């Protein structure tokens, strides 16, 4: 099959990060040093060659693009200082932008001014809209949903969820089609759908197995609770936990078991799960922000505006949510609790609406790519 060459591909990818792989002379050191690279999945060198040769289609259809966790080891040992780790990160941003049909991801990734202005304007719009529906702020007890009605929050969440799902589904379908092009199974093959789901969903995504065991297995690695895999996992576990708790709360209201805003003991399983998930989120984002600010190693040496905005929004979502928990359990109500609810809703609204266009999306695209490439034909049953 003929491949179309795009001479401008490398220059286009450069817009998404501090990329200078033109210094690379294909020695293969980065591939040899990468703990995740194998005989069949050799990278970053192959990914770099795709960009140098203008081969966009093979780049976007490769699973290796999503296997990299940016540990920074390839960059540290590159004899030409070509920074292959940052190239891989930039190439992933480029891929996310290509899967976005609206073009918003490209603007958020490549224009720092647009990134900041868009987030500020969106926050103002959210804030004014929610405040226009505000009610009283009772001072005898902290009734948060008298201030911002819970039906309004739920309805906005459903509308936003549908919009996000449609946009995200478009990108996911495009990406799945791209990565599936390299699969060549015999016609009528039965595939290991469930085993692949286990391998990808549990081992690769939820438990961070390869990141934990391969990328940070050095003897001089910091304690596990400071390692990149645990911080990365903490953010993911925290946000997923909070999402599940919120969904369960809403489901209980739909089933008329519990109304939104009903007081719960701090030891109630739902409340306690939410607090633990929130602490995971705050812990992970706080240390990741510190590491990026201090540029502690190669993995944190380059930070784009999109990296900062994503981490800060995640941190704010955790901190405002935790502050709300504190406000609920104080012996007497305080007005700041109501304003904290408004701030929390603004931050969560921005995070969710921007999910298909920001670093949030890489979690979904990584899982899809690894799942598709984990599919293998099952042995044929004996007749």
Image (cartoon, rainbow, N blue to C red):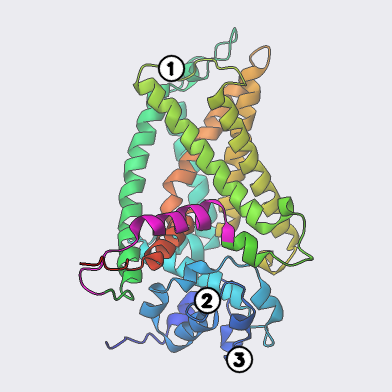
- Residue 224 image offset from top left, x and y in percent: 72, 54
Tag nearer the camera, 3 or 2: 3
Give the alpha-carbon distance from disc 2 to disc 1, as whole Å: 52 Å
Q: Between residues 201 and 179, which one lies in front from this camera angle?
A: 201
- Residue 177 image offset from top left, x and y in percent: 30, 67
Tell me which numbered mark, 3 or 2, is placed earlier along the sequence.
2
- Which residue, given by chain and number where applicable, does mark 2 sit on? 14
Give the alpha-carbon distance from disc 3 to disc 1, as whole Å: 62 Å
Give the alpha-carbon distance from disc 3 to disc 2, as whole Å: 21 Å
- Which residue, given by chain and number where applicable, does mark 1 sit on? 258
Look at 47% across and 36% down and name the residue there.
244
Secondary structure beneath label 2:
helix
Numbered mark located on residue 107 in the image? none
Decide if residue 297 is on the left or right side of residue 232: right
Q: Identify whether 372 is placed above or below 208.
A: below
- Residue 10 image offset from top left, x and y in percent: 48, 82
Asked if disc 3 and disc 1 are in contact, CB closer than 8 Å, the reply is: no
């Amino acid at each position: 099959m003929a491949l179309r060459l795009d001479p401008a591909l490398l220059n286009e990818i450069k817009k998404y990060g501090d990329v200078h792989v033109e210094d690379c002379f294909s020695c293969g050191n980065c591939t040899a040093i990468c703990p995740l690279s194998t005989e069949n999945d050799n990278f970053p060198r192959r990914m770099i060659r795709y960009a140098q040769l203008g081969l966009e289609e093979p780049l976007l259809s490769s699973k290796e693009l999503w296997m990299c966790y940016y540990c920074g080891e390839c960059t540290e040992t590159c004899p030409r200082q070509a920074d292959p780790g940052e190239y891989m990160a930039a190439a992933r941003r480029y891929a996310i932008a290509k899967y976005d049909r609206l073009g918003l991801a490209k603007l958020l990734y490549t224009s720092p001014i647009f990134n900041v202005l868009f987030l500020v304007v969106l926050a103002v719009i959210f804030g004014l809209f929610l405040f226009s529906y505000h009610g009283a702020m009772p001072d005898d007890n902290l009734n948060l949903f008298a201030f911002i009605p819970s039906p309004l929050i739920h309805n906005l969440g459903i509308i936003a969820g549908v919009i996000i799902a449609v946009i995200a589904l478009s990108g996911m379908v495009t990406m799945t089609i791209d990565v599936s092009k390299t699969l060549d199974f015999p016609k009528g093959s039965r595939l290991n759908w469930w085993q692949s789901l286990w391998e990808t969903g549990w081992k690769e995504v939820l438990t961070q197995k390869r990141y934990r065991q391969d990328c940070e297995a050095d003897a001089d690695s910091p304690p596990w609770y400071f390692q990149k895999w645990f911080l990365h996992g903490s953010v993911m576990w925290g946000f997923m936990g909070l999402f599940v708790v919120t969904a369960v709360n809403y489901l209980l209201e739909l089933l008329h078991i519990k109304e939104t805003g009903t007081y719960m003991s701090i030891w109630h399983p739902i409340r306690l799960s939410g607090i633990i998930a929130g602490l995971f989120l705050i812990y992970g984002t706080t240390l990741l922000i510190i590491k990026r600010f201090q540029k502690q190693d190669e993995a944190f040496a380059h930070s784009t505006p999109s990296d900062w905005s994503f981490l800060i929004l995640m941190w704010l979502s955790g901190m405002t949510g935790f502050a709300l928990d504190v406000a609920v359990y104080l012996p007497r109500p305080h007005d700041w609790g109501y304003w904290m609810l408004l701030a929390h809703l603004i931050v969560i609204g921005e995070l969710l609406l921007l999910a298909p266009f920001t670093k949030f999306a890489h979690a979904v695209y990584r899982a899809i790519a690894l799942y598709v490439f984990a599919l293998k034909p099952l042995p044929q049953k004996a007749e």
